[in-house]
Image (cartoon, grey):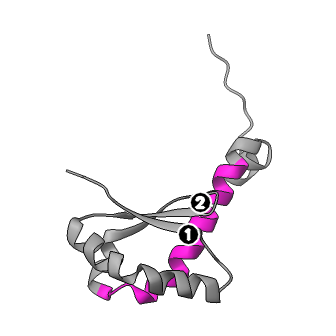
Amino acid sequence: MNVRSQHQFTLLQASENNPGLAKLMAQQKASLSRLRAIEMLIPAPLRPFVKSGPFEEGAWCLMLSNNTTAAKLRQLLPTFEEKLRATGLEVKSIRLKVSRQP
């Protein structure tokens, strides 16, 4: 018989006690802050198709829903990088990944 612990923790509390989870949470926060910084540069009709992806060791990935969005954002990458530098959120590279969702 399994006995469950009666203690419940928030994700923040759990991350504070687990270095691996804390690192993952920090990477997610860094990724989201970069997306917020460039969000207004993404054409409004394309914004629903763009999600923040992994950010690790200075490389950031944007997850895209389709190839059309990827083609347009590829043209905007220099503008994104400039905006991120101006806000102090530099990246070494930005990758675009189209996720195939059913």
Q: Residues within 10 Å of mark 1 (few under 14, many from 20)?
A: some
Residue 37 in the image: state x and y as whole percent. 55, 83
Q: Nearer the viewer, residue 54 or 74?
A: 74
Q: Label 2 is placed on what type of residue? A: Gln
Q: Residues within 10 Å of mark 2 (few under 14, many from 20)?
A: some
Residue at mark 2: 28
Q: Which residues are magenta?
A: 22-44
Does the magenta segment cover residue 43?
yes
Q: Are marks 2 and 1 in contact (CB under 8 Å)?
A: yes
Q: Helix, strand, or loop for circle 1? A: helix
Cα gap from disc 2 to disc 1, whole angstroms: 6 Å
| Any part of residue 10 in sight | no
Residue at x 62% of width, y 10% of height: 1
Q: Quadrant of residue 91?
A: bottom right
**Majority secondary structure of magenta residues:** helix
Residue at x 28% of width, y 79% of height: 72
Residue at mark 1: 32
Q: Quadrant of residue 44?
A: bottom left
Q: Compared with residue 44, is residue 3 higher up or lower down, i.e. above or below? A: above
Q: Nearer the viewer, residue 13 or 51?
A: 51
Residue 97 in the image: state x and y as whole percent. 36, 59
Residue at x 56% of width, y 62% of height: 59
Q: Helix, strand, or loop for circle 2? A: helix
86 to the left or right of 81: right
Q: Label 1 is placed on what type of residue? A: Leu
26 to the left or right of 78: right
Residue at x 43% of width, y 79% of height: 77
